Image: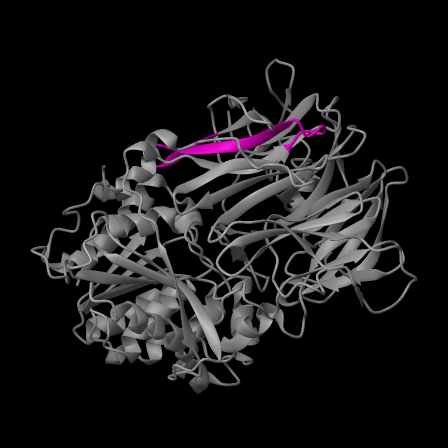
Amino acid sequence: MERIAAADFHELTQVASPRLSPDGQQVAYVRQRPDGDEEYEATVHIVDANGGESKRFTLAEGVDATPRWSPSGDRLAFTSTRGADDDRPQLWILPTDGGEARQATDVVGGVGSLAWSPDGEQIAFTQQVTDEDREEDRDLELPEEYEPETPDPRVVDRTVYRTAEQYTDGKRSQLYLLDPDGDEIERVTTADRDHVSPAWADSQTLYYGCDGDVPDPDDSLSAEIRRYDRSSGESEVVHETSAFQPQLTASEAGVAFSYTDPEEGTMAQTEVHLFDGEGVHVMTAGLDRSLGLDPAILLADETLYLGTPDEGATALWQIDVPEASAAGDEPRPVETEPEQLVRDEWSAISGYHVRENRIAFVQSSWDHPGDLFAADLDGGERRQLTEANAEYLTDRAVQEPEEIRYPVGDAGERASEHECQGWLLTPPEFDPDEEYPLVVEVHGGPHAMWTTSGTMWHEFQTLAANGYVVFWSNPRGSTGYGEEYMQAIERDWGAVTTSDVLAGVEEVTDRSYVDEDQQFVTGGSFGGYMTSWLVGNTDRFTAAVSQRGVYDLTGFYGSTDWAYKLVEDEFDTTPWEAPEFLTEHSPTGHAHKVATPTLLIHSDDDYRTPVCTAELFHRILRKHGVDTRLVRYPDEGHELSRSGQPGHIVDRIERIARWFDGYADTDTPPAVERDPQAGLTADESETEETEQ
């Protein structure tokens, strides 16, 4: 059997975005695979929901996404970058009985969320546009010779002026209606706010979310749920709520939407509320879990479906909608208990859809990186509809993780107040009589949850294949274990998480095959914060790799996107109120104590955790003579490890392994003593590496 390697990423197929046909007999989904070092090929496929051969339904040109069946099932709408000279996706429509797809939009902002009206006469969609775009009608149809210009100079007059990998540059998300037969486009919204998540209740009623009518929408969770009447062309606010851009779903039973407690902000679990035309129900009152997945929620007839993290796995639930309530000011908790539909131990679900008493979902497990499944909601047998990576997996040594549960308590104490869940992965051809170096992985978030699968499957298996025992866990602060567990890190990210992570390290180090003198740590985002915090507060680790981290909370507050709310909500302060407190809780406040060789990995276009705080941490390490190196990836953002350019994804994993190899008990010299590209497969022009 061959060992899994970083470069194998080029051979892995990802399955995503399942959508059942109106009769529930077929499933459309997206298959994505690397196409060289810089791009992906993503196409729409269709498979029978009862099993059978999967067929490609769109051309292998550009990146296709968001397949949506028409209500009659005779057409399939999707977005694609095919034929474009940039990355703006347009809406395409393809007849399902054969024929060529045709491009239905050519708009300046590209096409985002889309939803068919129940009568099939309209498709609602969003796009990012400026006032000038609307004045020139570029949001309806682009002139043939139009070329977008980058502002020079760029004038900033918003609190949050960039996110993901882009500057807003005056753009707002606006809502439109497309006639799928005549390709005529109608504007629904024009206000200087973001409009999101269109959802049809019936053929005349369209709901959507909108920023609240407040002085600074960027600095508020205030949101409106609006209802648009297609016959009159009028819209009205039906409910005022709070959310980080609400996610909506609708049916004749009402409109359901995500809700975040404004008093707790990022410390709150995301709930689901439902407005039935008279009052509001708290649909998740009986579920101590936070929303997740895509779609976040789905309302079909009078049943609500949703997905949540759940103790190291993803669970799908259904909740019956109660009878219409009398009007009232306060949301009312429903008494109906959620019913669990799907949950496989340690498995991750990345997308699902329900229709005609049938559910389709994409799930990955320890033994495969993701496939499409279907099952009947009445308890019918589950069917695996794809084997996307069967050929690849045939001759690869895939290791099965071992679950570990261990007690954790107050910071610095191994008490039994809480139990932490983790996993241990051993190398292929593992010999319990031998000793192996240990790699500790810390997840991001901070309110996230790991399983044995999902986006980390390839990285964990690759590190094990390189001869490391790999340990990862869900310390306090993680989602999936209830609100109390998630909020345990309030005002103290570092010490509480350190206590839980090191308790797990002690647990696995008790095993004779784990070398206590060769232990390494890595993590991204909040995991990068924790990696740099650990090396600044303990000498436990032989070497570290900190990725896209938050290193200085004050610098992060001033340079990030909406995530500056993490400082306000998680630490209950601001840089001007408690500068010394934030310094004490920042890795840079302890960087002068670091002796551990530390590699820093960052993306140049990461506007969630901008590179400026990584530069500060790197400079402090250099000033104190620590073995360090900063690797920066151009044209990448915060999602590098999950959806970055294929060549960069491979390069990143290889650099992690190479850094650890250089300080392990091997013949490999430290990376800082080698040529920057030695032992790597990527082209040296793809990264900018700053050496010690």
Left or right of 280, for residue 68: left
Left or right of 654, for residue 672: left
Question: Quick check: 614 above or below 97?
Answer: below
Where's residue 488, x and y in %? 51, 77
Q: Nearer the viewer, residue 678 or 606?
A: 678
Judge whether residue 158 is colored magenta: no
Q: Residue farthest to the top?
A: 99
Q: Nearer the viewer, residue 203 or 418?
A: 418
Q: Quadrant of residue 241?
A: bottom right
Q: Residue farthest to the left?
A: 667
Where's residue 410, x and y in %? 44, 83
Q: Nearer the viewer, residue 339 or 469?
A: 339
Q: Nearer the viewer, residue 440 or 644?
A: 440
By secondary structure, the bulk of the magenta-drawn segment is best described as strand
The magenta segment = 20-42
Question: Quick check: 681 above or below 640?
Answer: above
Residue 141 seen anywhere in this rendered image of the structure: yes
Residue 37 seen anywhere in this rendered image of the structure: no
Question: Quick check: 606 above or below 204?
Answer: below
Q: Residue at x 80, y 66 (%)?
A: 331
Left or right of 499, for residue 417: right
